[in-house]
Image (tube, rainbow, N blue to C red):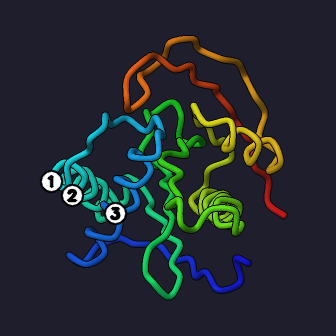
Amino acid sequence: MADEVRLRRITYATDAELQQLADVLIDCVDGGASVSFMHPLSRDTALAFWSRVTDGAARAERALLVAEDDAGIVGTVQLVLDQPENQPHRADLSKMLVHRRARRRGIGALLMQAAEKLALESGKSLLVLDTASPDAERLYERSGWQRCGTIPGFALWPHGGRCDTVIFYRELSPA
């Protein structure tokens, strides 16, 4: 169960944490997740991505949440907090990733709940996301997200071929 998983926010990542984040991203791409990268994803490319993300987290442009078990980081999600001037109430939920060895343990749901709580604490009342994953779609729908529609051929699967993306939103209100 997910009770052995710890969640925390990272604003600065150590080298070890960057390596673990890269492991999660590489595993997801190897497993066929359409998350902006093509297969094979090099460790250098994954590390450069996470360095940019943590730089943005240090500047409070985004929030980076991680899920850890006794072996290290097994999942992550981001909130893109820095939005245009006319959208101060909105954040984008991005890169919900769970390592294949840790799936089906409730980690995605825990990360989603933590991201929504953090969004509210950051003054955000509307979240948006897109996904190409049917498993993620089920998680988002169970979590109260509303499906807007599908954009056909939006991106490429990491092993090639076009994939659709589904757009979701969620209005947040304090408990």
* Cα distance in 3D space between marks 1 and 2: 5 Å
The residue wearing badge 2 is 47
The residue wearing badge 3 is 23
Where residue 99 appears, x then y in whole percent?
49, 61
Amino acid type at mark 1: Asp
37 horizontally vs 73: left or right: left
Say few, some or many: other residues with alpha carbon within 10 Å of mark 3 (under 14 / 14 to 19 / 20 or more). Answer: some
* Cα distance in 3D space between marks 2 and 3: 9 Å
For marks 3 and 1 on the same chain, the one whose residue lies earlier in the sequence = 3
Tell me the quarter of the picture where residue 55 sits: bottom left
Amino acid type at mark 3: Asp
The residue located at (44%, 62%) in the rendering is 64
Query: Relative to the observer, which residue lies in front, 47 or 42?
Result: 42
160 horizontally vs 70: left or right: left
Where residue 135 appears, x then y in whole percent?
69, 43
Query: Relative to the observer, which residue lies in front, 71 or 107?
Result: 71
Q: Looking at the image, is mark 2 or mark 3 nearer the viewer?
A: 3
The residue located at (37%, 23%) in the rendering is 160
Dots 1, 2 in contact, CB < 8 A: yes
Instruction: Name the element at disc 3.
Output: helix
Say few, some or many: other residues with alpha carbon within 10 Å of mark 2 (under 14 / 14 to 19 / 20 or more). Answer: many
Dots 3, 1 in contact, CB < 8 A: no
For marks 2 and 3 on the same chain, the one whose residue lies earlier in the sequence = 3
The residue wearing badge 1 is 44
Amino acid type at mark 2: Leu
The residue located at (20%, 55%) in the rendering is 43
28 horizontally vs 88: left or right: left
